Image (tube, helix red, strand yellow):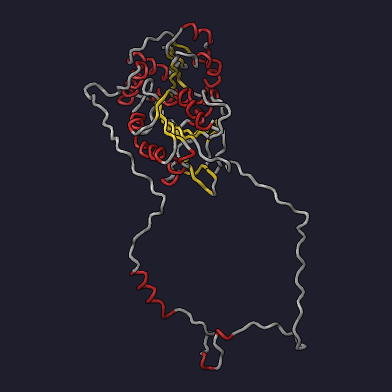
Amino acid sequence: MALLARPGQARERLRQALEAAGARIVLEEDPCALDPAALQAAAPQAVLVALEPAVEDALEKLDPVLQAPGVLAIFDEADLAARREGWEAQRWIRHLAAKLNGHDDVLPPGHEADLVLDVRPPPLLRDEPVVDAAPFAPHLAEAALHAGRLPSDTLPGRRQDEGLPPPSEWSLVDPVEASGGPRSVAPPPLPDFSHLELVPVEEPGASVAGAVLVIAGIGGPDALRKLLAEMTPGFRRPVLVQLRLDGGRYDNLVKQMARVSVLPVAMAMPGDAVAAGTVYVLPDGVGLEMRGGVLRFADVDAAHEPLAVLPPAESAVVVLSGALPARMDAALALAMRGGLALGQALEGCYDANAVKLLAAGGGELGTPAELATRLAERWG
């Protein structure tokens, strides 16, 4: 292992975690002062990087080594590493050991248990609206109570038996001037539209038929980097990334992915239309909606779950390490309606609980490079 972190509490905690996970540290250095040749000469099998704004620029020059074949790159937020202790620290060490040793056993000693999979297909989604079956009798009774007080169609204070013609016999007459003759009113001139012409209006995102939704969590940044690095440059589907970060530093995630992605990377903002050929990072609180036939980002609520909003036949879901297992029913439902459901291969997957559920329901698994190839075959 190589440990790249600035001196401080985060570096101390990460060194302790590596030692507890059974790793042998061949290089420990501040990435801001490290020469790429020195990192390459150490020949690490894996590199653990503590991310913080001060090291962003330094990582760019180290990227060729971090992306080299046979090198496993693991990223952790420095501020989280400095605060992680107790049960949370032990849990992170178990996940780290599982990733380094290529297995998925992350349970504490004495709690080993097989994952129970429910392989029943999820229920089909209903397209028709749900009708409220509340009784109408109370509303009818209230209408009858107020019917007597409704206004009639006669003039106020007059009855039809006082000589006023019934309303159905009223008619409109031309206005009469004081001279007694009808008044002639000239129509206003029509505006001249001869110099105007119609032009097509194309709003950004209007041509987007669907999208690729990437779901990930702990261990997901590594797989996401490899997936985006292998995407086809001409890929036209937008890629929406929902990756849970404990510290919520999604701006850092955008910068990290922009360095390796062949597609432009941007932060999703509520109200913006989704554009083709762009990778969007969705922070907490941002979902998706279809408005006027255009996919837009929106403030999240139950109605803005992307898996329920995306057009199934034109969309795909990619499940990476750390995704929430609770979302797999919706992912498989999208696949049953014509969508594409892909998952990270179990080998090298840091937290594979959701991936296993996806595979049990018929989802395809593969390495990040293989997943990128599969997407290109579908929408290259």
Q: Toward which corner of the image does residue 368 lie, by quadrant?
A: top left
The answer to whether residue 151 shows anywhere in this view is yes
Please identify the residue farthest to the left as the structure is shown. 110
Q: Quadrant of the C terminus?
A: top right
For the point 27% across and 29% down, the residue is 115
Vertical relation: 104 (above or below) 238: above
Residue closest to the eye, 228 or 358: 358
The answer to whether residue 244 shows anywhere in this view is no
- Counting every numbered tag in the picture gives 0
Horizontally, residue 172 falls left or right of residue 122, namely right
Q: Position of residue 170 (x, y in %)?
A: 59, 85
Q: In which quarter of the image is the N terminus?
A: top left
Residue closest to the eye, 358 or 99: 358
Residue closest to the eye, 265 or 365: 365
Q: Toward which corner of the image does residue 194 lie, by quadrant?
A: bottom right
For the point 76% across and 79% down, the residue is 184
Vertical relation: 276 (above or below) 21: below
Q: Position of residue 356 (x, y in %)?
A: 33, 29
Q: Where is residue 189 in the image (x, y as percent from the top left)?
A: 77, 67
Vertical relation: 19 (above or below) 342: above
Please identify the residue farthest to the bottom as the structure is shown. 162
Q: Where is residue 340 in the image (x, y as percent from the top left)?
A: 44, 34
For the point 38% across and 54% down, the residue is 130
